[in-house]
Amino acid sequence: MASSMQFNPVETPLVILAEGCFGAHQSKTGLGVIRYGQWPITAVLDSQQAGKTVRQATGIAHDAPIIAMLEEALNLSPKPKALLVGTAPMGGDLPSQYRDVIREAITKGLHIISGLHIFLNEDPELRALAQQYQVHLWDVRATTNENIITRQLPRPSGTHVITMVGTDCSVGKMTVALELNNALQKRGEASVFVATGQTGIMITGSGVPLDRVIGDFMAGTLEQEIDDVIKASHPRWVIVEGQGSLLHPAYSGVTMSLLHGSAPDAMILCHNTKLKTINNFDSVPLPSLSRFVEIYESAASWIKPAKVVGISLNTSTLAEDDARAAIAKAQAETGLPATDPVRFGVDGLVEALVNTF
Amino acid sequence: MASSMQFNPVETPLVILAEGCFGAHQSKTGLGVIRYGQWPITAVLDSQQAGKTVRQATGIAHDAPIIAMLEEALNLSPKPKALLVGTAPMGGDLPSQYRDVIREAITKGLHIISGLHIFLNEDPELRALAQQYQVHLWDVRATTNENIITRQLPRPSGTHVITMVGTDCSVGKMTVALELNNALQKRGEASVFVATGQTGIMITGSGVPLDRVIGDFMAGTLEQEIDDVIKASHPRWVIVEGQGSLLHPAYSGVTMSLLHGSAPDAMILCHNTKLKTINNFDSVPLPSLSRFVEIYESAASWIKPAKVVGISLNTSTLAEDDARAAIAKAQAETGLPATDPVRFGVDGLVEALVNTF
């Protein structure tokens, strides 16, 4: 596997760094780890919301405090053991104001967990400091740099790979994938989640940071990861997180490799109802959901046919009535079951999967 | 730019290493450099064809000898100054039998030029040897690792970006792009060629080794390269080499990034008439050329509309009559001008471009 955990999460309480953005889009890594990870959360660092709890700031059922200074976390219980960089800025650079906090955390004996494109282990100052204070710097996006080319590995019959595809980045692919995986397991189905992004890897402890892999090896690396997972646990379901969008001007190549590298048996289309264009690219309007279904089914079929069998909507900006209306509209338009997995669960999607195979 | 030349090619005679495969598909890097590069060619190293000339082995109008042992080249004129690894094996590893030749070349004072994925500069033995003998190791695929995200940079009106797209790898995208660029320049048009693969970079001295770039940055790195080229020379035409195929199970993501990162105004579709499936992937049959036109126009349109305006065929496995018939069939099927650029020139494609804009 391309990236794997260096800590036992249940024994590693976290301070999550989300300065100036906790609860917002940019803090999605932190939110995902709080919502789905096994790590105890000691506190969230965001001076602009200090004094609130996670629950008050985000609605997530967690009472960890939001604090203004890292120092405050050191006396809280559970005693923190690591600082997790909880933001995913475009491009993944290290925001300059974060360096001070990371430096301070290291000197207080905290390990650092980062999914940024800039690797902390390649930063001479931070690496030296980590050695001095004997803490780990886990660069979640660092890969083992094996040069793996797709080989179209055979799959055992009875194993179904389900890949999340999206209208854009950050539309809920990881969320619905984790919810689906949990729901399938609760039904007694053998199901595994394959992380393809830094937050998913932080949550599950392993996976492929696909957007960090060299172009020629993206599809092959993901194919290998799925093959490893199938051989390790013989699941009926492999739920692949997904990444980006075929319509994203910067990341479409990653999504294309993810689609062809995972070679799914079915797809779930994910969308955030607030989006009218690709985020940060106003020149790229989003077509209808049914057009997206056509696009993904067509692109999959170039290598291996696969159908979109359900729609997952992030309706978090809508009132509940409007959310229900948006879901009903998506169902009517596409003829597929639709839901907001956080608000209304994933029963309909699970039924669609089980009935398809 | 992402990779640039370390030598003046006209002053650097080459020995081209193509052991066991000169003239065949695997030696396409060497063939491209001989056909289109400015480097003097002292000899080609391929023990299986030693005694022939390049012309006798390949039909290319060049009388450099093919030799069995590197040593033989040292007394030939022009005296060689570099060894160029002239093969592009799948995945780009260093074939084990090549290591001995590279080691010997270094000890004879030759620089090494390599487009492999395995970087010679990262090989402790070869790097130490190169330092000892004061020669350069040019890893053509090495990038500067700038993390560039697509910004949809504006383009000056009157500049037309033309991207080569293909049914598969190695179908003649670089060849037709270089021929088009030459033909446009001969007509007095301001035209530049943008290399996107190792052979193109060896020929022109700069470019983006796109398949080596990290997934998230492929499109942005190519966009930046095109922007740099436009700002440097204000061309009317930017001819982008292209890479892979949207239907290639391993490399489709690279092609997708190339398409969206170059954001072409028009495309040329390239095909080798001998192919019925993706090379090495028999499970992926190639659809018709007109279906390929639809696929590329559709995928381009997700970000910015662009038409395929001509077809370039590699008919090298066909007799001339059959080649003419294949070209006529492609024209009839697609309604677009078609040619084999090596056999019949690119006049029809140049007309199509000039008449489109």
Image (tube, coloured by chain):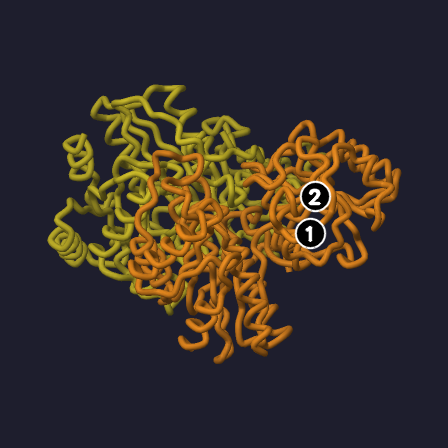
Chain colours: A yellow, B orange
Residue B86 in percent (x, y) is at 66, 42
Badge 1 amino acid: His
Q: Name the residue: 29% across, 58% down.
A: B333
Q: Name the residue: 45% across, 40% down.
A: B250
Residue A193 in percent (x, y) is at 35, 32
Residue A265 in percent (x, y) is at 27, 35
- Whole-Å distance between the Cαs marked 2 and 1? 8 Å
In this picture, residue B101 sits left or right of residue B133: left
How busy is the neighbourhood of tag 1: few (under 14 within 10 Å), some, or many (20 plus)? some
Q: Chain of mark 1?
A: B
Q: Are marks 2 and 1 in contact (CB under 8 Å)?
A: yes
Residue B320 in percent (x, y) is at 45, 52
The foreground one among A329 and B248 is: B248
> Which is more N-terminal, label 1 or label 2?
2
The foreground one among A136 and B193 is: B193
State the SS at label 2.
loop
| Residue where numbered disc 1 is placed | B62
Q: Which mark is residue A279?
A: none
Badge 2 amino acid: Thr
In this picture, residue A222 sits left or right of residue A318: right
Q: Which mark is residue B53?
A: 2
State the SS at label 1.
loop
Q: Name the residue: 25% across, 40% down.
A: A306
Could one spot residue A102 in this view of the protein?
A: yes
Res B51 → quadrant: top right
The foreground one among A250 and B297 is: B297
Q: Name the residue: 28% across, 37% down.
A: A179
Q: Give the farthest residue toward the front.
A: B321
In this picture, residue B91 sits left or right of residue B278: right
